[in-house]
Amino acid sequence: MLLPFNILDLKKKVNDLLSSFKFSKNSSVNVKNYTIDKNLKTMSKDDISINLTEKEVNLLVLLNEQKKPLNKKLILKKIWQYSIDADTHTVETHIYRLRQKINNKFEDNNFILNSGKGYMIWRKETK
């Protein structure tokens, strides 16, 4: 910004910077020791990354937000907007493929677990 400056120009610059910061902050989610970029649709750790689909990003963000396992019906409703009565293997198929991606690139085969009550992101318990 050049001096002298107009107060309206300063206000616009501050608003632009705040918007950019909020956008950047909301686009990134930390899951365990990984970073999910919702805009780029990537999951990364150190210098390694994988590409994700929109549904995979939404699924990981949903699982990360929950502290308890989510059952298939709830996932179908939240991610795919399917009826809870729908009879489909969409959730199982997506989770299977996502587990393969994560395991192949990061060698982490315990990232998404099925507890018997539903799916969850494995979090190491600390004492």
Image (cartoon, rainbow, N blue to C red):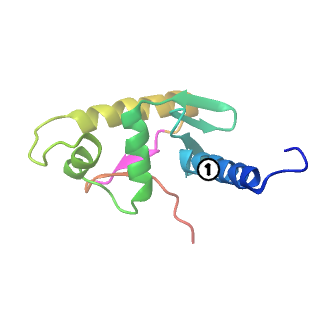
Residue at 46% x, 44% y is 110
Say whether residue 15 is left or right of residue 66.
Answer: right
Q: Nearer the viewer, residue 102 or 63?
A: 63
The residue drawn where x is 42% and y is 45% is: 60
The magenta segment is 109-115
- Relative to 26, is 56 on the left or the right? left
Res 121 visible:
no
Q: Residue at x 52, y 39 (%)?
A: 108
Quadrant in which residue 94 is drawn:
top left
x%, y% of residue 22?
60, 52
Q: Residue 32 lies in magenta, yes or no?
A: no
Q: Which of the two residues, 88 or 2, is positioned nearer the viewer here?
A: 2
Query: Amino acid under label 1?
Result: Ser
Q: Position of residue 24 (x, y in %)?
A: 61, 46
User: Residue 54 appears at what percent x and percent y?
Assistant: 40, 33
Residue displayed at 28% across by 31% down: 93
Q: In which quarter of the image is residue 59?
A: top left
Q: Can residue 5 be seen in the rendering of this structure?
A: yes
On the image, the x and y values in percent for residue 126 come to 56, 67
Q: How many marks?
A: 1
Q: Nearer the viewer, residue 27 or 122?
A: 27
Tell me if residue 114 is in the magenta stretch: yes
| The N terminus sits in image quarter | top right
Image quadrant containing the C terminus = bottom right
How packed mark 1 is, by other alpha carbons closer than 10 Å (few <14, some 14-19, many 20 or more), is few
Residue highlighted by disc 1: 19
As drawn, the residue found furthest toward the bottom would be 127
Q: In this view, does 2 lie above or below 74?
A: above
Left or right of 60? Residue 84 is: left
Instruction: Give the residue furthest to the right.
Output: 3
Secondary structure of the residue carrying tag 1 is helix
